[in-house]
Amino acid sequence: MHRLEVKRQMGKGDIAAVAELLEVATAADHHRPLGEHQWLDLVQGGRKGFAGLVAWEPGHDHPVGYAQVTRGSGSWALEFVVDPHHRGDSTVALDLVREALQVVGRQGGGHVHLWVPKPGPEHDRIAAELGLVRGRELYQMRRPLPIEGDLLADAGLDTRPFVPGQDERRWLDVNNRAFSWHPEQGGWDLDTIVQREAEAWFDPEGFLLHERDGRLAGFCWTKVHSDEDPPVGEIYVIAVDPDFKGLGLGRALVLAGLNWLGARGLRIGMLYVDATNEPAVGLYKAIGFEVDHSDRAYVADVAPVE
Ligand SMILES: CC(C)(COP(=O)(O)OP(=O)(O)OC[C@H]1O[C@@H](n2cnc3c(N)ncnc32)[C@H](O)[C@@H]1OP(=O)(O)O)[C@@H](O)C(=O)NCCC(=O)NCCS
């Protein structure tokens, strides 16, 4: 019989215990159970609406499961993980997700995305039992680095590095207009970008800006995952100002980013993209990216609970 703790704020000890659980699960599953936004929410104290749900089992001095709720722009994100040794008991996952949905309900309800990396039939079962249905699907795409031949010849777009303390406002303007439709990447504010700049991986040299007619026309922000073996070079965020769409800048910016990563010795290029983002998926396939796996959101509209 397990017991759930619902925490609106996580203490240092809670964070350490959950981090250990996430590590064990990452080693077993070969992927991280929490997305980057959720991980930052956990370690940096959480935004408005944050809740961490920790599952304990008698006789075990570590959490056997964890779920996290965060309020995004217009919807809620929910993720969960169960210790690999406790997955035989599906009630841990069911209780975590059920209680997390209640937390959302108690905070006014709304649209919820339950994100599952590399989903399997058991996730379909849990979702169905709790009234969630399949929603967005995210591809993780990969291609080898460095780029060569014709692609390399097209990678010479004029770019300059992002300058912290100077470029945030104009970058936010382009990002938020290009991603106005996007639940996680749209609606960023100064805090969101400053939070990213404080991350150990942040390197302004790999955050490439392209200017045209005195305006920021597009950017390619890369992120090096040096803790992975072998290290992976991610096209972290790429966008073109809607006023400059269809001019070949998107392709040129991705190539410039890949070239930057390849020149730093990375041998794997990676990115995430919504499966339905046809312009972007088409562009990535045309330059040699292939789908490695997908992550899935199960969705529900949660009614407010008094
Ligand atoms: C995706 C994006 C970066 C493409 O930038 P762009 O400068 O407009 O694209 P390009 O002009 O370089 O075109 C690249 C290729 O995509 C194709 N393409 C561009 N827009 C398209 C559309 N709406 N539908 C289908 N194909 C499209 C082009 O035909 C071109 O193919 P080609 O090289 O075979 O001619 C841009 O649309 C954007 O910023 N979108 C919003 C942010 C986003 O979705 N980022 C990616 C998230 S992972």
Image (tube, grey):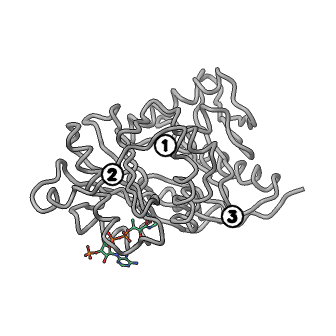
Disc on the earlier residue, 3 or 2: 3
Nearer mark to the viewer, of 3 and 2: 2
**Reading the chain from its start, which is encountered first: label 2 or label 1?**
1
Q: Which residue is mark 1?
A: 33
Residue at the disc numbered 3: 111
Crowd class of label 2 (few under 14; some 14 to 19; many from 20; radius 10 Å): some
Would residue 109 appear left or right of 150 to someone viewing this image?
A: right
Ligand 1 shows up in the quarter that is: bottom left
In this view, 150 is above or below 197: below
Answer whether labels 3 and 2 touch (C-beta < 8 Å). no
Q: Along the line of sight, which residue is nearer the eye, 263 or 99?
A: 263
The CA span between labels 2 and 1 is 35 Å
Residue flagged by tag 3: what amino acid is it? His
**Measured Cα–Cα span from mark 3 to mark 1:** 21 Å
- In the image, residue 56 sits, relative to residue 82, either above or below, namely above
Q: List the residue tagged with mark 2.
A: 159
Give the crowd class for mark 3: few <14, some 14-19, many >=20 residues within 10 Å: some
Q: Residue at x 74, y 37 (%)?
A: 6
Spot occupied by residue 207 in the image (x, y as percentages of width and height): 39, 45
